[in-house]
Image (cartoon, helix red, strand yellow):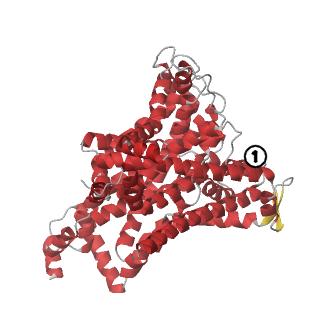
Amino acid sequence: MEAGVLEGRRRSRGLGWRGVDALIAVRRAGSKVGLGRVAGILLLVPALALMAFLLVGMVTLISHSLHQYDTFRLKGGAFSFEQYESVWNDPHFREVLVRTLWMSGLTTLITLALAIPFAITMARSRRRWLRLTLLVIAFLPILTGDITRTYGWLVVLDSKGPVAWVVEHLGLGHLSLLGTLWAVGIGTVQVLLPLAILIVLPAVMLIDPDLSAAAQTMGARPRHVFLRVILPQLRLALFGAAAVCFTMGMNEFANPALLGEGVRDYVGNLLYATYLILPNPYKGAALGIIMLVVIALGVALITACGRLLDRRRRGAAA
Amino acid sequence: MKRALDRVGRTLPSTTGVLAVFGVVILALPTAIILVASLTKGHNIVFPPHGLTLHWYGKLFSDETIHNGLTHSLYVALVAVVVDTVAGVMAALALAGTLRRGSGIARVFLSLGIMTPVVVSAFAFYTVALNIHMAGNLTIVGLGVAVVVFPFMLWTISSALADRDPTMVEAAATMGADPVEQFLFVTLPLLAPGIITGAMLVFVLSITDFLISLVLTDVDTQTLPVVIYSGLRSNVSPLLGAATVLFIVLAAAVCGLVLRIGKLERFVFGR
């Protein structure tokens, strides 16, 4: 059947169709040779090549972190753990690490506290324009990029900016937020909020309104309805959002550098300074690996807490 | 204490509203203020502004550093879009088709770019670039950004693939279409919106990329975000604000297009 149909079509063909026929012939030949399975893997090659770029670099970083480095002659040396020791024993590193961890946790909590009402408002609103507007407001910051967001806060939080102007006109005195952790934290919340909303929204849309209504008919006050009925339905999404927010909070770079005016550095900033400004790329590599491990541990901890609470709930229900 | 909490609890619906407004302010205020800042008359940005002017937008096109930065950013974005589109379409097809059983692990592996901190990935690329003596090369920057942004392309195309109506391909087959023709004339056109959405996301995310460009470029090959960053460290000027507005306009355009083509509304709200 195939040969007959093709013969019939091959007669009056333009150039494009000839190309298609050629591809068909290639495919037929290929399937006779058994190219089917291999084709799937072949299709993955470009993507795998891309990942190889990252992987080779990561392996090199790991290798560097395990060798000595001569900061005078700018060359690598023998195998050694001294980079890790040097980083870990550095009091400045400890200060920066604690600051980064603390701020990541704090901003995660604040972000979740803001994301839930935002998502609830989006899910409950009956007007399409409101839903769309909130959607755009939520996702535009992600697309504008790091520098745009940080620039915005540099202007907003400046001592001559709008927030300071409002505060002074309310008679509350002078406000100087730039260079403090407050500024860095506010900037970070704006980075984390879209992601948290994105993760929490599907769960909020799945909240069963009948459950809340049933609770209220049985006399539960709104506070109870929220804590005992709505929040548990969001638990999985909340822990997922917490893990993502924690990770992104740890990865912050532009906000601490610019909003913190160089005195509120995060681990990422310290890595940059160690690698390029000191310069000790091997020590920087070790710092990077430590950063990776800390973040992984944090995410594991958050996920474990989520599972623990899940099991406790099921145990109580049973 | 309990009664006080209950009183708060009774007003909980409006608490939701207040917190939601707070969220809106945090999300939207900086973007709005940037627009005002870029129109400020003086060299320093004060509030309320002493006067409004379009002067800085004019200066945008004449300033050489900004002009070069924009060209470099466009090139990086172009490289990232081309590489990610080719790799993304092929990978999504492979993962949905012949390799479906191992696709979970493969997807996680291909999302590595997002899972490692950007600053660490940036230095991973940096070591490779140094070893092949291509430090500062913009194509390398493009490839690095492509790796980090790749998951967005993969997710977009994969969900478009999953959304696709399988009976379309079957219908074409029953009418005598060869698998090549099925792919070229049925699957690909159906995937087109997804591919375009993914490409636009990659474009805007790579043109605004900051950290990878900061690490991988040198003074001659700075991209626009790096130019702005360098400028910000000395003075927060309205000129930089005007340059930033470029990014905002681009992001807004992509947002709008994604909403129309990418059916984002249906994806998020299911309606």
Q: Nearer the viewer, residue A296 or A7?
A: A296
Left/right of residue B242 with respect to residue A269 in the rendered view: left
Residue A83 occupies quadrant: bottom right
Residue at the image position 48 percent from the left and 55 percent from the top? B149
Asked if residue B75 can be seen in this view, the reply is: no
Residue type (three-letter) at the residue carrying disc 1: Ile
Q: Residue B114 appears at what percent x and percent y?
A: 52, 58
In this rendering, is residue A139 above or below A83? Answer: above
Q: Residue A259 appears at what percent x and percent y?
A: 62, 37
- Chain where mark 1 sits: A
In this rendering, is residue A71 above or below A310? Answer: above
Asked if residue A12 can be seen in this view, the reply is: yes
Left/right of residue A253 with respect to residue B264 in the rendered view: right
Categorize mark 1 by other alpha carbons within 10 Å: few (<14), some (14-19), many (20+).
few
Q: Which residue is mark 1?
A: A277
Specify the farthest residue to the top. B50
Q: Nearer the viewer, residue B224 or A7?
A: B224
Residue at the image position 52 percent from the left and 16 percent from the top? B41
Q: Nearer the viewer, residue B123 or B15?
A: B15
Q: Residue B239 appears at what percent x and percent y?
A: 54, 26
Residue B184 occupies quadrant: bottom left
Q: Residue B112 appears at what percent x and percent y?
A: 53, 64
**Number of marks in picture:** 1
Residue at the image position 78 percent from the left and 59 percent from the top? A88
